[in-house]
Amino acid sequence: MTRFHPNGLPALVWLVCSALFAQPLAAASLADVIEDVRPAIVGVGTSYPPRQPIGERRPDSLRGTGFVVGNGQLIVTNYHVLPELLDHDNQQMLAVFSGRGRQAVVHPAEIAAQDPVHDLAILRITSAPLPTLRLGDSAAVREGDAVAFTGFPIGGVLGLYPVTHRGMVSAITPVARTADAARDLNAVQLQRMRNPFDVFQLDATAYPGNSGSPVYDPQTGAVIGVVNSVFVKESRESVLERPSGISYVIPVTWVRQLLDRVAH
């Protein structure tokens, strides 16, 4: 027969209370981090000047997510988020959108540096500095580490309302080619295949519009990478109907290298 010693009761109560309250404390901590991170999350897209006659075209177009670093005027995003062409005849411009919902502010932007191989770009705005995020150490990331990312999934539909997802680093693996047809391979993608580099694979689902979102430590908010792509099983469209739950992240070490080019 097992004996119960009365003196063990306080310790038992402490253990039970710790288990009950551990989860709410962790959730509150993430909420605080999100509150700090969110002001530095921006949309990246294109914009026309006010009252510019552009027919039925939308004056503003959100193409992806970015986040502010450095002096508050530099924005990190994915290279593939950038528009291939701009309607210069009607003064269309590359733009960064800050704020939230209808209070969004449009900032004209220019490309400060780009790295197609690692699918990264640095944009520069000349308006007043925005809140920034701190870059962490991607070399210290381990499989199993918890992460969060904030951005604008399906941004053109949901609007400028940042959404946060949680997950973990499920693998650190050489960059993979998503399931597109082989004929879609371009020179940059072939170079990646010849010179692969490690990326973080997450067990969380990123959606179109999340490209360029910062992936960060949920306890500190330090950025460890940039959302790059979603593994699509069948087609690009299927990511909305049948998401695979696998996303890829470019380690922040490549962001640091690109920022060094801007500084020099």
Image: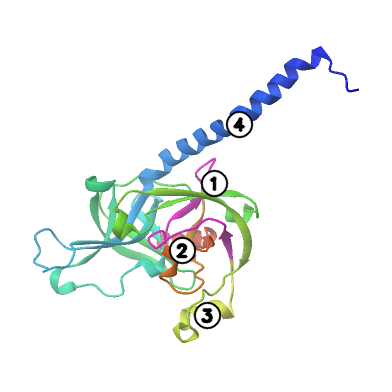
Q: Which residues are magenta?
A: 199-222
Question: In which image quadrant can residue 43 be found?
Answer: bottom left
Secondary structure of the residue carrying tag 2 is: helix
How far apart are the two marked residues, 4 and 1, measured between alpha carbons?
Answer: 18 Å
Q: Position of residue 179 (x, y in %)?
A: 51, 76
Residue 246 image offset from top left, x and y in percent:
54, 62
Dot 1 or dot 3, earlier in sequence: 3
In this rendering, the answer to whether 211 lies above or below 33 is below
Distance, label 3 to label 2, CA atoms, is 18 Å
User: Callout 1: helix, strand or loop?
Assistant: loop
| Residue linked to disc 3 | 191
Q: Nearer the viewer, residue 5 or 128?
A: 5
Q: Nearer the viewer, mark 3 or mark 2?
A: 3
172 sits left or right of 213 in the view: right
Disc marking residue 217: 1
For the residues bearing labels 2 and 4, Cβ distance under 8 angstroms? no
Q: Amino acid at mark 2?
A: Leu
Numbered badge on residue 258: 2
Question: Colour scheme in the image?
Answer: rainbow
